[in-house]
Amino acid sequence: MKKLVMGLLVALFAVSGLTAAEANHVRVFSMDNADKKVTPKTIQAAFEKAGFMVEANNDMLGPFKRDFKVLHHDVYNLMVLWDKETFRKLGVKYPKIALFTPLSMSIYTMPGAKTINVSSLSPAGIAQMTGIPANEPALVALGKKIEGALKAAMPKGKFLDMPYKMVKPEGKLIATADFPVKGDWEDAKDDLEMAFEGELAPNGFVSPAFVDLNYDLDEHDIDAYKFFDAYSICKIPVIYTVSQKHPEAGALAPCTMYLYMKKDENTIHMAFPTVYKWFSALNIKDKESRDVLLDAQGKFENILKKITKK
């Protein structure tokens, strides 16, 4: 298991070539909502009607008020969802699609505003992170399906022009690790995941959703993996701090960490996004946001070091 630590810290993956002139990957769909008829629940219903599995749609104002007393939004929800058909089509050839299976969105209204907004990561942003070609039909279809659900939920909505442009990543966008398993792979998987889950709360992390991605593949006779699990992971102080200046940050939070083992292997593969995607996509410059993000990444890496020493 110690090989996991070494692999995690050195086996980092990034797609280069991002420039400040490139279109923003985090998008915000906005609509006038003076009558307040559009709510997080109606938006969730539109996505479910379109065929998405909504794993969580959490009102964050309660935790924000409890932990920090001061609120900066009239509405702030984090929604976690995925499309089974997309994963069936891409999950075998491009397992990194699991970084966005489930994917995240924020639903928010600024104080006193009459608009409701939904942030999401564009197909181009998913392509950059996963290495999937931007013109891959299933990825293009996913983008259209998201847009269709947004328009159904918010018929008079439109995508906003963001007040900033992306910047070149300061570091690697994805941390990956591969490590061999000796003995019973099910025992190794269970031990690793139980240890991991046990370290989340003591380090201030929450996991609003867990998805057994391989279950649906098995249901459709796609026999590629022994297991494929995905955890949505969030740290409330991070999203509270960053969302003050970047409420659209919910397109990247909760983030998804995955673990899988292929059918013909005895190696567990793991990956999770680094905070450099946040810095790049949202052009984050303020010290408070950067500090809290880097602190969270450090704590997450320490969790993995600890559990793989056992």
Image (cartoon, rainbow, N blue to C red):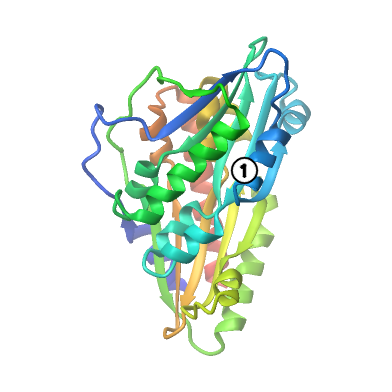
Q: Nearer the viewer, residue 12 or 24?
A: 24
Q: Residue at x 43, y 36 (%)?
A: 278
Residue 252 in percent (x, y) is at 50, 40
User: Is 296 situated above or below 160?
Assistant: below
Residue 267 in percent (x, y) is at 43, 79
Q: How many circles with numbers are drawn on the protein?
A: 1
Residue type, numbered disc 1: Phe
Residue 12 in percent (x, y) is at 33, 56
* Residue at image mark 1: 47
Residue 66 in percent (x, y) is at 78, 29
Q: Residue at x 42, y 86 (%)?
A: 264
Q: Answer with the quarter of the image where residue 117 lies.
A: top right
User: Is 83 situated above or below 18?
Assistant: below
User: Which residue is most to the top?
Assistant: 112
Left or right position of 253 against 95:
right
Q: Residue at x 46, y 83 (%)?
A: 263
Q: Nearer the viewer, residue 175 or 160?
A: 160
User: Is 298 situated above or below 106?
Assistant: below
Q: Nearer the viewer, residue 49 or 24?
A: 49
Q: Nearer the viewer, residue 186 or 82?
A: 82
